[in-house]
Image (spheres, rainbow, N blue to C red):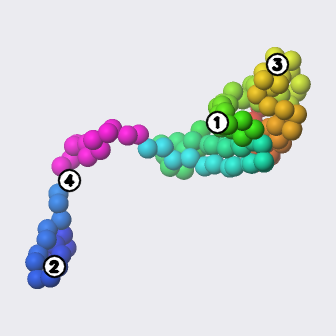
Amino acid sequence: MEDRIKINGEWYVKEQKAEGVNTDPLNLIETEYKGRVYESEKYYFKASLIMEDDDISYYDGCSIEFTDKRINPWREDYFDNESWFFGLLDGNEESLREIPDMMCQQGFDELVYVIKDLIERGWLKRK
């Protein structure tokens, strides 16, 4: 009887889980990811890779959560367009157009560093 335990002279039996019954009343979806954080006094960048359902490999491409800490409340944005990342590195006018509204030169330099580091680590790849 391995599904029983005796506590203070009382026997307790392990509760049986009904198959096919959802025990999560909120129907939450769980996702595992791998992340890296880059932070300065003005900006915060959090890069994430999402794990595939096989619990071994990761989906291609990564995303970057961006926080501008220069203003209060902090402004947050989310980047997941790999073409835009590479466009920034290549000096593409269309990619660069939004940068002045989002960050100063220091932030741009930090974002370029983050993108290059993610390429070096294999998190971002040109297609």
Which residue is under mark 4?
17
Per the rendered image, the range of residues in magenta is 18-29
Q: Quadrant of the N terminus?
A: bottom left
**Residue type beneath disc 4:** Lys
Of labels 3 and 2, earlier in sequence is 2
Distance, label 1 to label 2, CA atoms, is 54 Å
**Residue type beneath disc 2:** Lys
Place of residue 2 in the rendered image (x, y in percent of width and height, measured from the top left): 19, 73
For mark 2, give the secondary structure: strand
Which residue is under mark 1?
73
Magenta includes 22?
Answer: yes
Specify the label residue 6 is tagged with.
2
Distance, label 4 to label 3, CA atoms, is 55 Å
Which residue is under mark 3?
97
For mark 4, give the secondary structure: loop
**Residue located 32% across and 39% down the image:** 26
The image shows residue 50, relative to residue 7, as above or below, that is: above
**Residue type beneath disc 1:** Pro
Labels 1 & 2 near each other (Cβ < 8 A): no
Task: Determine which quarter of the picture holds residue 106.
Answer: top right
Q: Nearer the viewer, mark 3 or mark 2?
A: 3
**Residue located 63% across and 48% down the image:** 35
Distance, label 3 to label 1, CA atoms, is 24 Å
Of labels 1 and 2, earlier in sequence is 2
**Residue type beneath disc 3:** Arg
Task: Determine which quarter of the picture holds residue 79.
Answer: top right
**Residue located 15% across and 79% down the image:** 6
For mark 1, give the secondary structure: loop
For mark 3, give the secondary structure: loop
Distance, label 3 to label 2, CA atoms, is 68 Å
Distance, label 2 to label 4, CA atoms, is 21 Å
Which residue occupies the extreme front position in the image?
Answer: 72
